Amino acid sequence: MNIAIGTKNPVKIQAVKKAFELTQLEALFTSYDVPSEVAAQPISDEETRLGAVNRARHAQRKDHADAGIGLEGGVKWIEGTLYLCNWGALVTSDGTVFTAMGAGLPLPDDIAKGIEAGSELGPLMDQFTSRTGIRHAEGAIGVFTNNLITRQSMFEHIVLQLVGQYILHKSVN
Ligand SMILES: O=P(O)(O)OP(=O)(O)OP(=O)(O)OC[C@H]1O[C@@H](n2cnc3c(O)ncnc32)[C@H](O)[C@@H]1O
Ligand SMILES: [Mg+2]
């Protein structure tokens, strides 16, 4: 099957490819820089999920793929604490939408203050770690789990949830 991925971020692309390796599906991949149509820094489950769905829809339409996949990273407030939140969506050529959420943990106060002030998590994480390109590497989830879970493995898990739902749907329809 042809899978169109709605990002050019290599971490997300690798996550999709790795997840498909664990399935019985033969897949060919393309990737496109598509709009999420939400803020560059989504700040709720709803907004992050919508970003993932929009990316999946746009990617699917780009080359009439059998399925489009969108992955979106965001943050959300729970009881005054800022948490990481991550979402994925798979949209099929007949318009069926599957969604799934991934790992999320609380972020330090300094990061939360930066987000409140309007900054994006990517640059804030670079500042926090005195490095560059954390979002293309282990991500915030990697930094705050001591690399036990990386941004790639986190997104891989989301894609497995999406593909699992898709396979089940195909087998009963
Ligand atoms: O090229 P795309 O696909 O857009 O990949 P991205 O790394 O920008 O990822 P998102 O747009 O999904 O993430 C939304 C925002 O949150 C940031 N972000 C999300 N998760 C992150 C993480 O784990 N580590 C660092 N930054 C992260 C990212 O830099 C964006 O500002
Ligand atoms: Mg982005």
Image (cartoon, grey):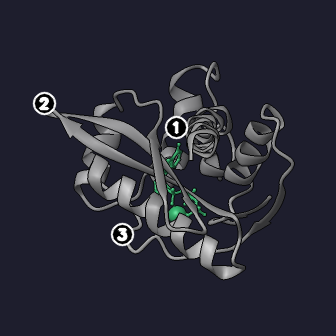
Q: Secondary structure at mark 3?
A: loop
Along the line of sight, the residue nearer the viewer: 40 or 1? 1
| Precedes in sequence: disc 3 or disc 1 | 3
Q: Secondary structure at mark 1?
A: helix
Q: Which residue is mark 1?
A: 140
Q: Amino acid at mark 1?
A: Ala
Distance between mark 2 and mark 1 Cα atoms: 20 Å
Quarter of the rendering occupied by the N terminus: bottom right
User: Residue at image x 71%, y 47%?
Assistant: 16
Q: Nearer the viewer, mark 2 or mark 3?
A: 3
Picture layout, residue 51 above or below residue 114:
below
Contact? badges 2 and 1 (CB < 8 Å):
no
Residue extending furthest front? 173
Residue 55, percent across and down?
52, 67
Along the line of sight, the residue nearer the viewer: 149 or 99? 99
| Precedes in sequence: disc 2 or disc 1 | 2
**Would residue 47 appear left or right of 140 to someone viewing this image?**
left
Q: Which residue is mark 3?
A: 38
Distance between mark 2 and mark 3 Cα atoms: 23 Å
The response on whether ligand 1 sits within 8 Å of label 1 is yes
Contact? badges 2 and 3 (CB < 8 Å):
no
Q: Nearer the viewer, mark 3 or mark 1?
A: 3
